[in-house]
Image (cartoon, helix red, strand yellow):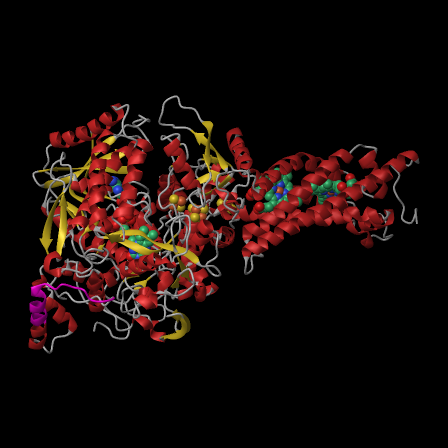
Amino acid sequence: MKIVYSDVLVIGGGLSGLRAAVASSKRGHSTVVISLVPAKRSHSAAAQGGMQASLAAASASRGDNEDVHFSDTIKGSDWGADQDVARMFANTAPKAIRELATWGVPWSRIKAGEREVVVNAKKVTITEEKQAEGLITSRNFGGTKKWRTCFTADGTGHTMLYAMDNKAIELGIDIHERKEALALIHSDGICNGAVVRDLITGELTAYVAKATVVATGGYGRLYKISTNAIICEGMGAAIALETGVTPLGNMEAVQFHPTAIVPAGILTTEGCRGDGGLLLDKDHYRFMPDYEPDKKELASRDVVSRRMTEHIRKGKGVPSPYGDHLWLDIRLLGKEHIDKNLREVKEICQYFLGIDPVTDLIPVQPTQHYSMGGVRTKPTGETPGLKGLFSVGEASCWDMHGFNRLGGNSVAETVVAGMIVGEYIADYCDDNSVDIKTSIVNDFIEREQAKIEKLCARDSGENVYDLKETMQNIMMDKVGIFRTEEDLVAAVSELTELHQRAKNIAIKTKTRSSNPELVEAMRVPRMIKIALCTAMGAQARKESRGAHAREDYPERNDKEWLKRTLAYWKNEDDPTPTLEYEDLDIMRMEMPPGSRGYGKDLTIHHPDTEKRVAEVEKLKEANPDVNRHELSELLNPIDLPERLRGLNERVGIGYE
Amino acid sequence: MASTAEGMKSLLEDRVVKSKWPARLDLAQSLSGLGLGLFMWTHLILVSSILFGKDAMLAITHVMEASFLTPDEAGGYTLIPALTAVGVFGLFIVHACLAMRKFPSDWKAHKTFRSQMAMMNHSDTNGWYTQVVTGFIMFFLGSVHLYIMATQADKIGPQLSADRMWTYGMWPLYLILLFAVEMHGAIGMYRLAIKWGVFDGKDPRATRKRLKVLKTLVTVFFLSLGLASLAAYVKIGIENVENNRVGERYVAGQEG
Amino acid sequence: MSQSNGTAQKGRTLKFHILRFDPQLKGDKPRMETFEIEEQDSMTIFIGLNEIRKKYDASLQFDFVCRAGICGSCGMVINGRPDLACRTLTNTFPDGEITLLPLPAFELIGDLSVDTGKFMRNMSERMENWIHEEPDAEPRKLTVLEEKMDPDVATEIYELDRCIECGCCVSACGTARMRKDFLGAVGFMHVARFEMDPRDKRTDEDWYDLIGDDDGVFGCMSLMGCEDNCPKDLPHQNRIAYLRRKMVSAGT
Ligand SMILES: Cc1cc2nc3c(=O)[nH]c(=O)nc-3n(C[C@H](O)[C@H](O)[C@H](O)COP(=O)(O)OP(=O)(O)OC[C@H]3O[C@@H](n4cnc5c(N)ncnc54)[C@H](O)[C@@H]3O)c2cc1C
Ligand code: HEM
Ligand code: HEM
Ligand code: SF4
Ligand code: F3S
Ligand code: FES
């Protein structure tokens, strides 16, 4: 039996995993990162549009600060987020971006003087101040009050990931590529690493560690059409779920992005609309102002996606063999702007559609994009069920996004969570040692080996590709943008059946080394489990919140549903997951539930809401002289690791 | 003891201070190539003076021999072309040695390069291989020619050169050499421009496209010129045989 | 790298000729295999290969991650040219014949899959592809304003930072194929990127130490395979020439 020992095992080499690894490594803990693919190919590289951080240097972002960022995030989440976490996040984001600036990310910078931008389809001149020249600039994104999204052209994730991976290389962190974690090694409520399969040789190795971090990204590929990379299959969530003792949070919270190209499903960044792009229907009519007169194209993502779907349902879509679509129009931004700031979008249009967005309209459709749900964690990033098991990034439900994530808040989350949770991981390693019997480790390896052998021994059975496609279609058709009881019930029952069938997969290629069919055969049954968690969570949640939109329950129901879904798979033989719930405590909220300000407010309020509003008011009145930092401290005292505390400086106003 | 310490020190320096030689050698390779390239273009134009008649060629020969310095302004110092030949020979050897470092190091490397060419069919890659092959050819044929020029510099002239071509059977060598040197030189000069980015300007990509066209034009021009001159020499050589004048020196104005 | 956009020819039969070889399997020999599939609208090689895997041969190995031309996983030799398979539309092949080989110059994992990751990691370690601050610099406080940077310089750095480490340039380089230790164009692009970055305090001498030899910039024979095959259109020609000039002046 082969064992690799380290203090920290990070599963996932995306932005979040690498940042956590950097933190623990800097604190002197030996750290190993494993990844399905070379770290720089992780899905984080695909983020185009930008990272939110309230630097407030550009003129259109003046007046921005942690408080505004916090409140946008909470509104965006439809009050589903953990407000402690969102506050920790908003306060740390400026530090994260400044750190990345020293690590080499070539953030786009402010140029002093006048420049023309497109706002609401009109050319507007804005003037950047001399004193801000050379500082990090920002663009407009949906659902935000200020222009807060910092970027490098439209290759933000790419430049961030490269800088991060280079940092990890500088620190000499071991990154083992082409390795897949198959199971978490745990006993007595403590997690001590994972069983890992080498995707080239097929060998199984136990990676034993004090702390284990799941940073495996989202589960977008449960859906037939998704903007996600094809390795975003939710395997991190699956191995956490399969421990039976730790839950997945809010799996039904799945975001659809308004503008992915048809049919490839490849994203064109929100930056397109942020920079002034418009949505048009088949008559080239700009329809968004009719639905959202205030925010128009820049309403929150879930809202825009739903409005587009509604408009298509009215027969206003452009027919195509892949279903009706709408148009994204960025022609008005001009060639120069597109060549400089929307280059990747241009390339994507050229290569996949054969069109030039400078002169042509881009066919777009709302498409699965982001997984708000994931491995449930506490604010420290540790899971509630297993000591020593942490999760960060899209894989986690740290829960700063609640039921809808704002554009630009995700790459921001990856690095901020990596920073914060990374410190807590290091603390944990300071205080704990590996204390697991080799025989237990051995059992885990043997169990995985036996599964592989069993799979290879079966000569006839289900075709894994068929199962996968069936699952993806169910999710697409029945657990999509708009959801109904009827569809969801059907989805759950079909997936339950599929889950049974998946126990009988047979593969043609029996090679134990590099074998794509075997890999698929091991993943698909778990994907179905994750799909079940998602569909069941959606069926159970009888309200509409954020991206979870029930046509039969259009109102947000704080009274009964201001709670987080927790999905467990308690016994391996269970036919379905078990759902439990965790209440969100309004009485501790810095920002009590209110209206997001889209369409008619249908919220059914919780009795505590009024109480808390009054309490907050009283607190404010009682402390008339406090500044905003002190007030937030009073309303929502948070705990941040020592080295991440401190106020953030802003140009012109200092630490105000 | 002291010498061991010295030895240690130089060993240490070898490890710590990176050698400056690779930079110098690379520059030298390019400069020698540039020198040879410019020389060859001039050379061919001079040699092609035969197209304007024997007198023209003779005049050029004389200028080259600095005959204007001699009292009778005929004949000349044949030592000059001889020495030039020796000098060029030197440059030629230096360039060849430097360039040969780049040759495929063994058969396997050669095969790999060939398979790369077969896979990609990429013009600049193929061009490099052409340089290797033509360079290899020139190494032999060029040496022969240079040796003759160095040792028999007095036997340069409209008639004697033509005799060498025809009667002494050198024309096949010249024919091959001509193709080799023109292809090698033009590709080499193009490569120099790209390699050092000297003409890059605002749009390096557009520049490269233009340079490529230029390279082809230059090759065609010099090949035509060379072939025409070669034909002229051969024609004179044949006439010389017919007129029984082989080995006679041409006298200015003889043929008006 | 322009993209001719032929008309979709739904229903046409495509012939994929694919190199098959699994070095993990004892006794396996390289061979070409042909698969025929029906062309669909907007079909890419990514879609085609997946279909072949589903329909004919589940053991076919290849690497795709983003399938959007941004992660650099899917470099392979497509009809003789190293390129990204995920963004190559099948309708760009008028005769419907598509020959696929794994990228040369990298370790073969199996069929069309090669280990570019290992190569790139080595390259990054060798070139120390990270920002080098002054040796005794205090770490910058994260609470204070970030250091300013000329906006145009930032844009220029990004131009080079767009490299996706796909390895096409290395596979398109005869020098890299002949000489195992040759840094390769991707390395030059990274060096050029950090050399330009004002945050990186390395001097010309430092750079010379890294690339001032025949495994580095003086080994480049200006074959321009890199320039002509980089899917992200990085300015190889111009930047390598720049580095060469710079290193010659540092070295003489
Ligand atoms: C097209 C697109 C554009 C986006 N644009 C933006 C944007 O502009 N702004 C923004 O804020 N957000 C954006 N996002 C979201 C954001 O990019 C992601 O949420 C974020 O990058 C996720 O990072 P991560 O580190 O959590 O995971 P990932 O980057 O997905 O990394 C996951 C890692 O886990 C590894 N892994 C997975 N499973 C296993 C296993 N079983 N064993 C071992 N390793 C495993 C993978 O190899 C990978 O290294 C975008 C998303 C998409 C799809
Ligand atoms: C100083 C050195 C040189 C001198 C003085 C010289 C001189 C001459 C002369 C006089 C001729 C005419 C034919 C003859 O007399 O034999 C000739 C022809 C030629 N030389 Fe040279 N040469 C020199 C170097 C070279 C070199 C280095 C090369 C190439 C490697 C070269 C290639 C040729 C070729 C190809 C021809 C035939 C030209 C034609 O086709 O018209 N020469 N040279
Ligand atoms: C023995 C004869 C010769 C040999 C073996 C030879 C070989 C080569 C080779 C292999 C190269 C490529 C070098 C590289 O890729 O870095 C080269 C470059 C070059 N050669 Fe030659 N060559 C010879 C003679 C000549 C002659 C006669 C000329 C003049 C026309 C010439 C001009 C050039 C030029 C201009 C270059 C480009 C230099 C560079 O890339 O730095 N060579 N030569
Ligand atoms: S330079 Fe271009 S070809 Fe080379 S690895 Fe980078 S993107 Fe790929
Ligand atoms: S192809 Fe190779 S030889 Fe130089 S110019 Fe590019 S690195
Ligand atoms: S799969 Fe990412 S570039 Fe092709």
Which quadrant of the view contains residue A596? bottom left
Measured from the top left, where is residue B83 in percent x and y? 72, 45
Measured from the top left, where is residue A168 in percent x and y? 28, 48
Q: Is residue B241 left or right of residue C5?
A: right
Measured from the top left, where is residue B78 in percent x and y? 78, 45
Residue, far top? C27
Residue A126 sits inside the magenta stretch: no
Which residue does the image show at 29% across and 66% down from the upper left?
Answer: A148
On screen, A137 above or below A446? below
Which residue does the image show at 14% across and 29% down from the upper left?
Answer: A443
Q: Examine the rendering and report whether any part of residue B93 can be seen.
A: no
Residue A615 sits inside the magenta stretch: yes
Nearest the viewer among A74 and A574 is A574
Q: Which residues are magenta?
A: A599-616
On screen, A599 above or below B7? below
Q: Is residue A433 left or right of residue A356?
A: left
Q: Quadrant of ligand 2?
A: top right
Quadrant for the C terminus of chain A, please.
bottom left
Q: Examine the rendering and report whether any part of residue A142 can be seen.
A: yes
Quadrant for the N terminus of chain A, please.
top left
Q: Is residue C82 left or right of residue A651?
A: right
Which residue does the image show at 13% across and 56% down from the upper left?
Answer: A561
Measured from the top left, where is residue B163 in percent x and y? 84, 36
Which residue does the image show at 31% across and 35% down from the upper left?
Answer: A466
Which quadrant of the view contains residue A501? top left
Nearest the viewer among A332 and B183 is A332
